[in-house]
């Protein structure tokens, strides 16, 4: 089907059914778009309150689990029927998934003794042992409400996939409206939606898939595997159906790539993205080979760019490895305690999916005890715990186990501490932790995960872990809307030095840094140049200037777009100094109560700290509270000042700005700035504000990336200004060509309102294409302005952009109520001020 053809909603529906038939679904097509297929109706006795096909389910239960009395099967079916007893749709949906994966447990008596029989509704091992049905206009009734989802996919009678389509030919309706329709279904026919595993939305051109709890920003496109080249012009919906919903992959996704996370507040359902799905299956195949290879124990390296769900990919891999590879022990290795804690938390929240609780090795003795077990278990440890006990006279790392059913999974595998090289210290020769790890676990298999590419000169990472299994780079993540672009804004605050000292100061910035070995105490990691620079950068006049700029910049950003911010300082001392300067300007931002305040410092304690430093100490439990507050968009906490913590592994989608006043390089810099690349509502990009001078370091760090990737990170803010001017020109010289809107700038509010009304009606009288062009360009200029609003030059455009926005909103109101009186359409003061 050509992309340029006139595509109606019915055309999209028919195309979906045709595509489903090609991959093995039995199609029950309705003859009318106002009622369901007669045969499907007959399967549920024409009772629209019945949302699954009970007869089909019972037949599948008997086929997959033969040999029981009829009453046993009837009771299993009743367990699926009883889902509707709970008013909470997500509790029911969670229970459905448990029944699908774990089977229906039916209690009975066997020769007078109680017995529990497990009946599985789906045969995940034999795809052909299941029945796959697709139908359109499946009518559902609940509380007198009647709805007809466009297409429903049944697996053994259970309605596990729902499609909602919109007309691609209608420019006023699109994929967002399809998503909104699904939200209506969740409230009006929850009895049907609680049986859902995958939701699909499409307008014939775009197609996305998501879970019941996913927001629009988490509905993702599905692509073909990298080794398959689809014909040009193949529609996204066709690809999604072919590679996600074909019976084999659909069952694999339902069984192995759906996670429920439940806390006191809500249940969240997580569905894999395509890059996670393909990677895990490839990694599993490589691991299966490596576990049986006595010579090469390298599974490989996974590079999935930071922010694209790497931690979740590790969970999926661990869960599948435990179930499919004979329950090996999985040792998850990290190099820092805070990262170890964060990743452990991700795994702990997925304990149901993993079918076990992960264990945390707190000491080297714990590691040795866990490794002495025969099989199974997911164990977390920092790599530093794998070293000889030199204090007890150990010169070599002892063998902890010779088992081969052991997978070592290393996070951020590019780091130098995973190396094998020897170093000469005052205590003798010491080796990289990777050697000690190998010595301790000689038959283990190794897989590495990284959010940044391996350096071209780095031979140790591939020596330990092997070659790339899968790559999901920055460009692909941005194209998929899995992450957003990162812009760079320079506001360097050097000290007021003599000309002769400026060059030395810049050299300090370029050369200062911390030793890469995090096993050393912080005071040993700091080199002399770093300490010098810390003192220079912490001078009061400089931090006063930074504080003034930060407050203005932060508040200007907030006025245009909600977001949270992180400030990165060189040291705990400088972090406290900057905090104090900011509080002088905005006293109400601070609060000593852990649960209150707009701004906090994330720092550990030191015995030598005085009272001023001590009031900002945070324990591990305190930091968990602050993490939760930062992730809560309704919490007043919007700013954190950090030194080393939270620069990797910390995920706050609403974080859109990072202010850097600390020299960083290489992987550490890329990992840090990626805190602002998460997808969030109305967030088009992240922003890095440079106070210290990291431009050259950023350029160097990106040398290991492709040209396309470099174009997505560290984009100069002036490029965004140029784009703002370009969009402004399109709006004024194309969309509003020949239209006089000079009244927008009047001091009289009535004149401004009349101008909005006049221009909106003139656009409505024009073509749909011109209206869409205006709407799209105004939407884009709003997002760009939110990014550049702190630039003085951008403020010249602010009044007109506000006017464009008011016209856009007014047009939307008129279209929403086309029969209403123009004069009844209210315009808020904020829309014309």
Image (cartoon, rainbow, N blue to C red):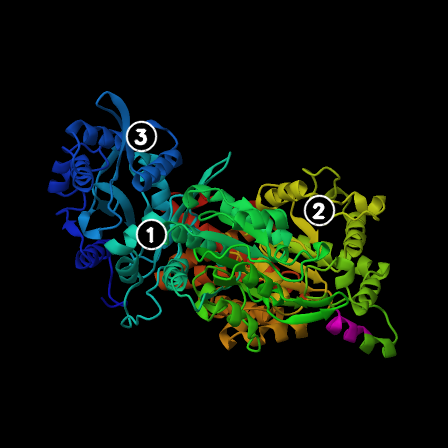
Separation (CA) of disc 2 from disc 1? 41 Å
Q: Secondary structure at mark 2?
A: strand
Q: Nearer the viewer, residue 810 or 504?
A: 504
Q: Main secondary structure of the magenta part?
A: helix
* Precedes in sequence: disc 1 or disc 3: 3
Q: Secondary structure at mark 3?
A: helix
The range drawn in magenta is 505-512
Which is more foreground, mark 1 or mark 3?
1
Give the side of residue 626 with respect to residue 266, left or right. right
Residue at x 22%, y 66% (from the top left corner): 1
Q: Residues within 10 Å of mark 1 (few under 14, many from 20)?
A: some
Residue 654 in sight: no
Q: Secondary structure at mark 1?
A: helix
* Precedes in sequence: disc 2 or disc 1: 1
Q: Which mark is residue 84?
A: 3
Determine which residue is flagged by label 2.
600
Identify the image quadrant of residue 235.
bottom left
Give the side of residue 493 with respect to residue 384, left or right. right
Q: Residues within 10 Å of mark 3 (few under 14, many from 20)?
A: some
Separation (CA) of disc 1 from disc 3? 24 Å
Q: Point out residue 762 in the picture as x, y percentages from the top left corner.
A: 42, 58
Residue at x 71%, y 56% (from the top left corner): 643
Residue at x 50%, y 58% (from the top left corner): 409
Q: Nearer the viewer, residue 730 or 388?
A: 388
* Precedes in sequence: disc 3 or disc 2: 3
Q: Which mark is residue 253?
A: 1
């Amino acid at each position: 089907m050509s992309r340029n053809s006139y595509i109606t909603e019915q055309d999209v529906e028919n195309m979906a059914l045709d595509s489903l038939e090609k991959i093995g679904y039995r199609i029950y097509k309705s003859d009318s778009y106002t009622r369901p297929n007669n045969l499907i109706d007959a399967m549920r006795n024409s009772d629209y309150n019945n949302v699954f096909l009970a007869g089909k389910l019972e037949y599948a239960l008997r086929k997959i689990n033969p040999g029981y009395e009829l009453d046993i099967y009837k009771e299993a079916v009743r367990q699926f029927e009883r889902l509707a007893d709970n008013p909470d749709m997500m509790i029911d949906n969670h229970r459905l998934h448990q029944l699908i994966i774990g089977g229906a447990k039916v209690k009975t008596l066997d020769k007078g003794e109680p017995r529990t029989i497990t009946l599985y509704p789906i045969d995940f091992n034999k795809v052909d042992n299941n029945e796959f049905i697709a139908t359109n206009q499946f009518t559902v009734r609940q509380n007198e409400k009647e709805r007809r989802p466009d297409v429903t996919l049944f697996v053994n009678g259970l309605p596990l996939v729902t499609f909602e389509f919109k007309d691609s030919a209608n420019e006023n309706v699109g994929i967002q409206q399809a998503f909104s329709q699904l939200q209506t279904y969740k409230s009006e026919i929850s009895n049907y939606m609680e049986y859902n595993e995958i939701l699909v939305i499409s307008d014939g051109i775009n197609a996305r898939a998501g879970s019941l709890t996913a927001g629009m920003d988490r509905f993702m496109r599905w692509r073909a595997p990298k080794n398959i080249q689809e014909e040009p012009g193949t529609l996204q919906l066709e690809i999604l159906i072919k590679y996600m919903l074909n019976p084999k992959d659909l069952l694999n996704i339902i069984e192995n790539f759906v996670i429920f996370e439940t806390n006191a507040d809500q249940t969240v359902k997580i569905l894999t993205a395509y890059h996670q799905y393909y990677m895990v299956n490839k990694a599993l195949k490589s691991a299966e080979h490596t576990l049986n290879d006595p010579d090469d124990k390298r599974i490989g390296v996974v590079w999935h760019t930071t922010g694209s769900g790497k931690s979740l990919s590790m969970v999926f891999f661990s869960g599948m490895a435990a179930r499919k590879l004979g329950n090996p022990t999985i040792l998850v290795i990290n190099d820092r305690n805070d990262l170890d804690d964060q990743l452990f938390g991700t795994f702990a929240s997925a304990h149901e999916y993993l079918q076990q609780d992960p264990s945390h090795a707190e000491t080297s003795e714990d590691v040795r005890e866990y490794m002495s077990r025969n099989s199974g278990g997911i164990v977390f440890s920092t790599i530093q715990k794998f070293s000889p006990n030199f204090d007890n006279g150990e010169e070599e790392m002892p063998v902890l186990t010779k088992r081969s059913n052991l997978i070592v999974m290393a996070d951020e595998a590019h780091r130098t501490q995973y190396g094998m090289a020897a170093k000469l210290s005052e205590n003798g020769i010491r080796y990289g932790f990777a050697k000690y790890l190998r010595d301790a676990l000689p038959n283990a298999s190794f897989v590495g995960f990284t959010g940044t590419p391996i350096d071209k000169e780095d031979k140790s990472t591939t020596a330990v872990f092997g070659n790339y299994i899968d790559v999901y780079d920055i460009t692909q993540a941005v194209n998929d809307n899995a992450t957003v672009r990162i812009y760079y804004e320079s506001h360097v605050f050097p000290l007021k030095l003599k000309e002769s000292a400026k060059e030395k100061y810049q050299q300090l910035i370029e050369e200062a840094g911390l030793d890469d070995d995090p096993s050393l105490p912080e005071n040993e990691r700091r080199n002399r140049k770093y300490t010098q620079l810390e003192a220079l950068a912490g001078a009061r006049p400089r931090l006063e200037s930074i504080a003034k700029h930060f407050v203005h910049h932060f508040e200007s950003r907030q006025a245009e777009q909600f977001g949270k911010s992180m400030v990165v300082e060189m040291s705990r001392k400088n972090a406290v100094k900057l905090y104090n300067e900011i509080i002088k300007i905005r006293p109400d931002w601070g609060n000593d109560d852990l649960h209150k305040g707009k701004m906090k410092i994330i720092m550990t304690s030191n015995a030598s700290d005085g009272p001023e430093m001590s009031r900002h100490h945070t324990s591990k439990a305190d930091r968990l509270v602050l993490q939760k507050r930062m992730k809560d968009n309704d919490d007043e906490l919007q700013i954190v000042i950090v030194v080393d913590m939270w620069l990797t592994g910390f995920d706050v989608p609403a974080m859109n700005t990072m202010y850097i006043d600390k020299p960083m390089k290489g992987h550490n810099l890329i990992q840090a700035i990626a805190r602002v690349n998460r997808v969030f509502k109305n967030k088009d990009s992240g922003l890095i504000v440079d106070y210290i001078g990291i431009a050259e370091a950023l350029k160097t760090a990106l040398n290991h990336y492709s040209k396309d990737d470099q174009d997505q990170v560290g984009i100069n803010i002036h490029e965004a200004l140029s784009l703002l001017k370009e969009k402004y020109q399109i709006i004024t010289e194309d969309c509003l060509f020949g239209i006089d809107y000079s009244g927008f700038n009047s001091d009289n509010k009535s004149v401004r309102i009349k101008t909005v009304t006049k221009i909106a009606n003139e656009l409505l009288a024009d073509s749909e294409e011109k209206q869409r062009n205006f709407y799209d360009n105004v939407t884009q200029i709003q997002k760009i302005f939110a990014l550049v609003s702190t630039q003085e030059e951008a403020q010249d455009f602010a009044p007109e952009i506000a006017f464009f926005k008011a016209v856009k909103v007014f047009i939307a109101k008129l279209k929403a109520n086309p029969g209403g009186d123009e004069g009844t359409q209210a315009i808020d003061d904020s829309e014309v001020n």
